[in-house]
Image (cartoon, rainbow, N blue to C red):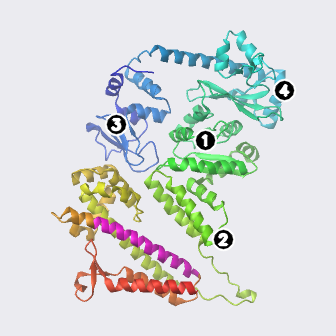
Amino acid sequence: MALPPGFLDELRTRTSLAQVVGRKVMWDSRKSNAAKGDLWAPCPFHQEKTASFHVDDRKGFYYCFGCHAKGDAIGFVKDTENVSFIEAVEILAGEVGMQMPAPDPQAQAKADRNSQLADVMEQAVQFFRMQLQRGVATDARQYLTEKRGLGPEVLERWEIGFAPDAWQGLWDHLRGKGVAEDMIFDAGLAKPSSKGGKPYDTFRNRIIFPIRDHRGRAIAFGGRAMDPNDNAKYLNSPETALFDKGRTLYNIARARTAAGKGQPLIVAEGYMDVIALSEAGFEAVVAPLGTAVTETQMAMLWRLAPEPVIALDGDTAGLRAARRLVDLALPLAEPGQSLRFAMMPEGQDPDDLIRAKGAKGVEAVLEKAVPLVRMLWDRELAASKLETPEQRADLDRRLREAVSKIRSGEVRYHYQQALKDLMFQTFRAPKRRDTWQKGRKPPPAAASMQARASLLARDVTRREIEALKERVALAILIRRPDLVSVFADGIESFDFIEPGHQSLALTLAARGGMEEVEQLIAELGRAGQGDAVDRIFADPTVKILPALRPGQDIEVAKMTVAELLATLEADRGHRLELEEATHDIGAADNEVLTRRLDDANQARYKVVTPRDAGSVDFDRAPNGMLIDRSEKERFDALLSQLNRQKGRK
């Protein structure tokens, strides 16, 4: 529908974005200034505790610094109500008393045609429902009531019907009501004969499930064959002006209402699963229409809930479908926007589980739903044998390739960390069992608890120093906004270890180009990063940084950040070496190995104070710290010796 020039501008002028958004959120009174139209709240598009969702009521725009959702009042209604652009315009126009303009003749004709098709579909719904009560549907009723356990009230509530085994049953009924032949064809209810004969009904000898859109209009049908020899057990309406199966979900209207009341959104496989789950109390349930979930359907799901639960049958096909869905969902994952997977018991679908164990059985399965990252891990773990280093390296490669498809830098970082943890937990050296009781030679003594504690203590110190370097780099960028754009790509992809630094870096990268330090710090505060900024500048080392002194040359600051990021990358490499060595000494029979590793770790990160500088050779790090050159060389020698010793074990 084409809108006249100026209509949308007038609508936006009359609409208060604060009032529209206020129906969905609770404003943060501490950060908001209602008098100036500057309002903050937890984002309605993703789960969070901090108020990172900003509304500028005077300009009529909103932006979330967490998930980056943005738009105006029309976009907000469109996304939160799951309606089209024109429907959102109609909703807002009605609220502010504006008359919707008449559409152009061509658009009006299309809308009228679709309305007529919807009326024909409603007549078909009533026909199929009536047929279910007749003698021709005896077997269908028996199947629904005895085998599926659906009582009369359930059949009525879901409008389930029956298509008789007749060539032109529905056709004759609609023609008798005066429905034109082209309308029946365009609604997908009949097909022309390819042999020059009479048209024939699309659905014959099938139980019928009406498919309605989010507005409640009947737009299509799904039919289950009663003949076990039928080529297609389930058949959907062909695509029409009303129906696009890749853009539709069964039970979307009911599910939207239930999800809005806080029920978990469940994605099942078929019609009967949806009905069984809904009747058991899980009303926020939908199903794709006989095909794999599409990207459009994923967007529809995330408009209803931030983390839908994919409930699939407990068989090979169900597991295969879940693993295919991983590839679709990964690139689209955003902070607070993901999936969980609940696999039914082997050989059961949700309907089977409900009839066997009731709603509690389903609740138990949903409570064990695994996140998307775990489904990715399990899929790749099952893809091949993992008995050799080469096979494990291939697993690592496949995981990296999958994670690289995630568009969100923040989500990608956390996936990398989670998968590293899973890799370590899965392939760490197994604990040795006490076999001496069986008459065998007792195993060599493992490294002592004291040695392990010392190693862990050094690990904490190492991480503290890495975190300090991160604070220094971020502090310089905050005080020098003109450098943010230079390092934006680097800090977006960098793996920070200090809690809060990753989110701060991503927010900082998005704010590149600001000229004033105060403006940048204020923007970071409004984005929920104020505490992280305060912690950085409260650090005593940060306070005395040469690169932050007034009048310091920008090239010095630029070089300092570049060097810090480079050394942090090198530190990550050293950390991986030490973690690998730590991994190997779990079953070590030589206390010296542990001690050497501990000594190497201490030597690498020994910091020299300025008063010691006269007695040792030192290197000055870009952040002003003094590093004992001889201790660093000693570390490199010890680590080489350690690696040689590991090779002889």
Image side of residue 8 versus residue 149, left or right? left
User: Which numbered circle lies on residue 387?
Assistant: 2
Nearest to N terminus: mark 4 or mark 2: 4
Task: Identify residue type, mark 4.
Answer: Thr
**Who's the residue at 37% across and 61% down the image?**
501
Nearest to N terminus: mark 3 or mark 1: 3
In front here: 118 or 483? 483
Foreground label between 3 and 1: 1
**Relative height, residue 261 to residue 133 (above, below):** below
**Relative height, residue 272 to residue 161 (above, below):** below
Q: Residues within 10 Å of mark 4 (few under 14, many from 20)?
A: few
Q: What whole-number distance in Å separates the C-alpha atoms at marks 1 and 2?
A: 35 Å
Label pair 3/1, CB-CB below 8 angstroms: no
Q: Position of residue 464 (x, y in %)?
A: 37, 72
- Which secondary structure class fits the magenta region best? helix
Q: Which residue is mark 3?
A: 61
Q: Which residue is mark 4?
A: 138
In front here: 345 or 25? 345
User: Which numbered circle lies on residue 293?
Assistant: 1
Q: Position of residue 405 (x, y in %)?
A: 51, 52
Task: Identify residue type, mark 3.
Answer: Phe
Q: How many marks?
A: 4
- Secondary structure beneath dot 4 equals helix
Foreground label between 4 and 2: 2
